[in-house]
Every structure is written in structure tokens, then in C-alpha cells.
Amino acid sequence: MSVIRIPSPRSVIDRRDLTERIAALVEEHGKKARLPVVELLRGALAQGRAEVARRLTEKPTAGHEVAEAQAFLVDQLLRIIHDHVTTSVYPAMNPSTGERLTVMAVGGYGRGEMAPHSDVDVAFLTPIKHTAWCEQVIEAMLYFLWDLGLKIGHSSRSLDDMVRMSRSDLTIRTAMLEGRYVWGDQDLYEEARERFWTEVVSGTERQFVTEKLAEREDRHKRMGDSRYVVEPNVKEGKGSLRDLHTLYWIGKYIHKVRDPSELVQVGLLTQKEYRAFRRAENFFWAVRCHLHTITRRAEDRLTFDLQREVAARMNYSDRPGKSAVERFMQYFFLQAKVVGNLTGVFLAQLDEQFAAKPARGLLAGFRAKARTLKGYKIFGGRIRAPTDDWFAADPVRLVEIFVLADREGLEIHPETMRLIARDATLIKEGVRQDKRANELFLELLTSPNDPEKGLRAFNEAGVFGRFVTEFGRVNAQMQFDMYHHYTVDEHTIRAIGLLSRIEKGELKDDHPLAHDIIHKIHSRRALYTSVLLHDIAKGRGGDHSVLGAEIALKLCPRLGLDENETELVSWLVRTHLLMSATAFKRDLSDFKTISDFVEVVQSVDRLRQLTMLTIVDIRAVGPGTWNSWKRQLIAELYAATDERLRLGHAEYGRERRIAAKQATVAERLGNRGDLVAQVGSQFVDSYWIAEADDVIAKNLVQFAAASNAPLSIATEYYPARGATLVTVIAADHPGLFYRIAGGIHLAGGNIIDARIHTTRTGRAVDNFLVQDPIGRPFREQAQLERLRTLIENALANRVKLLPQLHARPNARLRADAFDVRPRVIFDNKASNRFTVVEVNARDRPALLNRLAYALFDSRLMVYSAHIATYGERAADTFYVTDLLGEKVQSASRLKSLERRLLEAANEVSDAVAA
């Protein structure tokens, strides 16, 4: 691999021509030739990069070809620079044996593949400690390379230093493993290569593999530990180029392979697997080269704003129900999945090779006594098919083997995994309708052991999508938004894993409500199946809840669920977004909110099932999506609905509830309990229903202290909700809400909930829950003080709110990659007293303030606001009346209000974009 061969090499760079032109410059300028030489080389580099970019445009999927062309360009530049320095700058008249130098490409560059803006990793080797001439040449070459704007990773070592440092440092050893001769003394390179293999590698094979796999695990944890994160790193992520390179490094270290194709000869990959290796590697190289070309820097993260452009450059187009970018990313994740499968069989095969040797250690695993189970052979903690035609004789075994592995806690042998991948096509309609096959699948899905592990293996083997074809359609499918962190199949399998962990009592502290109710549901089969199917219809171009419910009606009987379970699963899939939408977007203190929810749910068992599905669905979206605020809202809705279902629908209990709340507050206040009677009488009934007892206790103390003050602002960390509680007490007047919201936004806060109350004496008592832009509460005293100051300034009209809000940087710049069209929904049936206004728009710093101002400007009173964010989208819901306290019923007024709110949402987007 010492020579890189590419098509039409001289159209990338013509070394002979450049060498002649440099010689002419030296002849013309003498010692002052340096600057013109640099300019000449700089032009050659720019021209070469342009040609590489042209080839990428012409053949947008030719990853290997483009990466090799880039490495060839750098090779030729190094050779030209080396020859110029050693002949014209520092010629060696009578070179001694120590005045020898070889230039090696190491690391990724050593493999002969580079993205357009990758680092250039070079090793300068000398036979002994550097002579003055060697140091001069190395320094001069580096200055030329730096002047060209290349990012150089370099080392200069003697042969002894190279051996010593390679032995002690895994990174150096890996870099040298990829070492490739570029130019200089070739005999010295051959000597270095021989010493590396005999003095560094020999006898350390097991240690290298162990350390390399540990390094890989650490890298995966840093990058999110999933192949299916929606903004993957094409170089370092799980299932990425680096994973493929790790396989090659291990094969090279153990078997001295010089090319990935030789992994077949040494038995680590089959020919078919090697072709999959090259196909995935080629695709990832193409994506990486596009990323570098677009950004003009070493960018390896496939971020949302770049995904759309790379998809277009690679000629992906829209299809019904699936955009070009979603199709591109689905293929990306399918290739990442291929890498995962290759890694599994490769490492297991490696284990077999090591285990076959007398030495024990690496990956040897548990060596148990051989036995048989239902015809399968079990040895060393692994289950394997006894014959090559085992699955062809009975394709139901393609499901059975995963169930047996789950039951017995076994791994599937790599050779058997290869058979499964080969024979997965045997799963046809007859197998899908087979009663035993479906019973086995349902056992795997509802396993009390580790269904997540079993289903993931089932999926990655290619069997899941063939047995449940509807699941195959969402395999590796991403959703192009900032809310969902994983592909649909990965999200679903994670949700099933969470459900299993809750059922086993492992997440009691995280999910106390779920822990309490999961063992009270009537059908765990229905619950697990509903989690499997809740997103099964995504990407079909319609409402995935409705379409998924229809799929459930067909699929559940096939899986063996009875009529009642089938109807329940279908209902759960159809309504799986209802509970979160009600909890996060509606006023849970409003009687009608609970009544409407109860009307849909109808039974306590359905409530429990829906609550479990909602919790695992939200939690499995991604890290940080589930928080104490959402947990509290879901628990509140559950408790209110459970009470209504058990005690009936009458509202006669309202007075009793208020009295009970007042007694609890008095108890909380201790020796200040008399405030409930003294101050509490000024608060209307809806206040006592809406607020939690601990918030009421804080409000009463603040209200009493502020009896003669025109304004009182309290801010404190509120751990029960994972937020900061901001309470503003002031004389009520129109515009109060939008000014408070503006002050909070100026302080860097996001309002996640707001309850606006007016006492019988005309004072406003407004409670806000506030977090920072990434969902954390304000805790520091300086932060709390800043909140108070900016709210006070906004209310006193000391600041011009809109210009300052627009000037604030957007904390979520990636949202610019998405086109979110603002939408306004009015609902006059959701509340008996209020018109409910929901605005969906792109999340922006000034959005809530502008919407609140639009409501004020439309002469409406806001009684509560509920703010939900889903990645780049915000859903802000307001409970409003007109100035007379009536609902907004007039069609013309609603149309006018809709126009004003859409203008406000677009005004914010335009201002931020400007």
C-alpha cells in the first residue's frame, strides 16, 4: 500500500511540472525563492482541492475514490517539498550514515484516505538521534506545510525512540501500525517497519485488542452510546468509520493484513461481509468528504443544518411520506447498523481464534460443559445451530433461537448469526402466520428477563423487520426534528427496555407513579404490544396514531392477543399522545380539562395503561427529555382522572376540595396558619383549585408582607418541579403578563408554566415556573437577583423590551435548519369559562412575549399559560377571555386574533433571522 493509484492523477496535481517550475524559481530568485515557491504550492493545493471537489460533485457517492485522491494530493506536495528542501535549501553534500531521513504517513493519512480538510499526520524517522541537517530539513518542511494552511500532526523520532514510545503508548502504536512510506530513504522505512513488527507488535496482540476495544467503548460513551443518535458523528460515532478502522487495525495487528480485503483470507470476515464493509466505508467516506467540502473545515458531525445539504448533494429526493433528508438519514443508519453487525461477527470470530489457542485470556469468556437444548448446541455461554441447513429445515427457528437465548442468558454464536443473516429471507407469509412463531415472538417481546437486548439482537440480525414487516418500514427511520434523539426502531426498543426496568423495580426513584401502577394493569401483553406499535406507522404520510391503530387491529390477533386486548392496544396507539398533550398544554385545574380526558379514557385500567405508555414514550425520546416538571404534570393528571373515575363526575366536591387544600396549607404554615383565614379570603375559588399547597403557602406569606407595597417579586429554586418559581404580586392591569414574560426572557429564562390570578381586591398574583434554555433551573443568588431586577425594569417600562429581546442570541441555532410554519388553534369546548388558544411556532427567545403582547393588544385577558417545547417547536397555550370575562365566540374576532398571533410569531422569526 505504499503507492496510491487514482484515475487521471495529473489533473489533481502534476509533480513533475511543479518540480520543474520550482527549479526555475530557484534559478531566478536564488535564496529569495521561498515566497514564490510557497505561492506556487498554495495554488497547486487550491487547484488540487478544486479537482477533488469536482470529482465529488460528479460522483457524489464515490467516497473511497475522493478520499484517495485527497491523500494523493498531500503525498505529492510532501514529495515536492522534501525534494526542494534537500536539494535547494539544505543540500547534504557528503551525507553521513546518520543524515538519513524517511517521511511516513501515519494514522488515517497512512491508510491512504483523507477527507478534504483532515489533519495531515506525518512521522519523520531518522536512524539515530537527529543530526543538525535532519533537524533543519524537518523544520523547513514543516514551515512549508504550515504556510500552505495545512493542519499538521507531526513527530520526529529516531528508530529507537519510535520503538520505545510505540511500546508505551497505544495512540502512537496505532498511528505507526498505519505507517506508509511517502518519501525519503526507503531502506530506513523498511528497517523501521521490520523493527515495529518484531520489537513492538510481537507478543502483544492480546493486549492491543483488549486496549483497543476498551478505547472503542469509551469513545461510544462519549458520543452517545447509540448508532441511532439523530445528529451522528460520521468519524467517531458508534457504527462509524472509526469502528470499521478498529476492525482493520485489530486484523492488521494480529494477522499483518495489508488491506481490508485480506480480513477474508484470515477468516475474520466472509466475502459477503467484506463487501458490506467496503460499501459502508465508501458511503461514510462520501458523507465525510461532503461535510468537509460544504463547511470548508474538518467537520465530522452530521448536524441538522448539514443533513439537508448532504442529502441534496448525494441526489436523494422526496418520496410520499418521507423527505429526501429522512431517506438519506435512513440509509445512513442502515449502514451504521451494518457496521454494528460486522463488528459483532468480527469480534466473536476473533474470540474463536484466540480460544482455539492454548493461551487463555482475551475474550475467552465462560467455558462451560457442552450440552444440547432443543437440538441447538450450547457451549461457552453460546448457542449455535447444529447444521448449515438448520433454519432452512424450519424457518420458525429464526425466531425460536432468540427466545432460547433470552431464556437461558446466552449469546448467539457468530457463525450462527451469519446463518441467520443469510437465511432471514426465509421468513415469508407462512412463517408470519405460524401460531408457534407468533407465540415465540410475543414471549420475546414480553420477556421478564431483558426484552431490550433480545429485541435489539432480533432487529440487528435482520429478522425483526421481516417477521413484523410494519416494523421493517420504520427500521433506521429518523424524524427530521430536534425533539427525537433516536431512529424510530431504536426509540421503540429503548421504550420497551424502560418498561421492563420499571416492571422489575429498577427505576422506582425516577418513576414512582409508574412503579406503583405497573403491577395493577390487567394485561401486560397489551401494554408491551402497545409500546411496540405506538410509532409503527411513522413515515406513511398520515396521522401515525390513527394508521397505527389500524395496524394494531390486524397485527394483534396474529400475535395471539384476544379481542379485548386487541381493542385496548388499538385504543392505546390511537390515543398515545393524548395524555402528554393534555398534561403539558392544558390547565389541569380546569374542571372541563379533566372531564374531557375522563370521557376518552373511561376506565382506571386504561388510565394506567396509557400512563405507562406515555411515560416510557417520553423518556425514550432521548437524554434530558423526561424531567421532574413533566413527571409532576403527568402525576397531577393521573391523580385527578383517577379520582374522577372512582368518585364520579359531579362537581359538588369542589367546596370540600378547597377546604381540604386550605387545611393542608394551614398545616404547612405552622404558627402562621392564620394567614389562610386572614389573607386567603381574598383569593377566589379557582386559585385554591389551581395551585399546589406549597405554592399557596409561599404566596400567602409574600402577599401578607406586600400588603402596602405596589410591587413584590419573589424568586426561588423550586426542586419539586425542577424549575425556578417566580411570583409577582402587583396591581392588576392589562399588559402585566407580557411585560413580566419579557423581563424573564431578558434574564435568560424560559417560562414553562404560568398561572395568572386576580384577588377579590384587584391585585394580581402571578406564578411562573422558569428554566434556562436547556431545561435547568436558576439556582444561584446572582441569577435570582437578575430575574427580579429585569422583571421590575420591564414593569416600570425602564427597558425597551422588543429590541433587547431580538438582540439576545438564540440559544438553539440548530433550529434554523427547520421550517416550522406557525399555526393557531382555537378551542371553545375545552373549558367552560375560557377560550383556549394554542399557538405552534418555531421556538425563539421573544416568542412568548410577542404572543402575550398580541393578546393584550387584542384586548384579551390571560388567566393561565402553558408552554411546551418539542425540540425546535414551541406549543404555547393560553386560557383567555375578553375584558368582560366572556369567551371569544365571534368568528370575525377569532379570525382577526389568528392573523395578529401569526404576525407576532413570524415577526419574531424575521427579527431573529435579520
Image: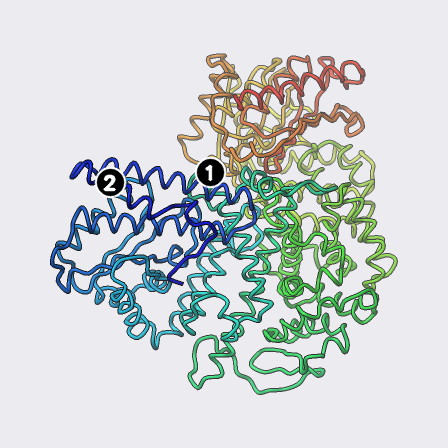
x 31%, y 54%: residue: 122
Give the percent coordinates (x, y) of residue 541: 76, 41
Badge count: 2
Labels 1 and 2: the sequence-earlier one:
2
Q: Percent position (x, y) of residue 581?
A: 70, 38
As shown in the figure, which amino acid type bears the numbered disc 2? Ala
Front-most of residues 889 and 492? 492
Q: Is residue 260 above or below residue 533?
A: below
SS for callout 2 = helix
Give percent across and percent down for residue 421. Answer: 66, 68
On the rendered structure, is 523 left or right of 33?
Answer: right
Quarter of the view holding residue 146: top left
- The answer to whether 119 appears left or right of 160 in the picture is right
Q: Which residue is mark 2?
A: 24
Answer whether labels 1 and 2 touch (C-beta < 8 Å).
Answer: no
Circle 1 sits on which residue? 295
**Few, some or many residues within 10 Å of mark 1 (<14, 14–19, 20+):** few
Instruction: Relative to 875, say whether 348 is above or below.
Output: below
Q: CA distance from mark 1 to mark 2?
A: 36 Å
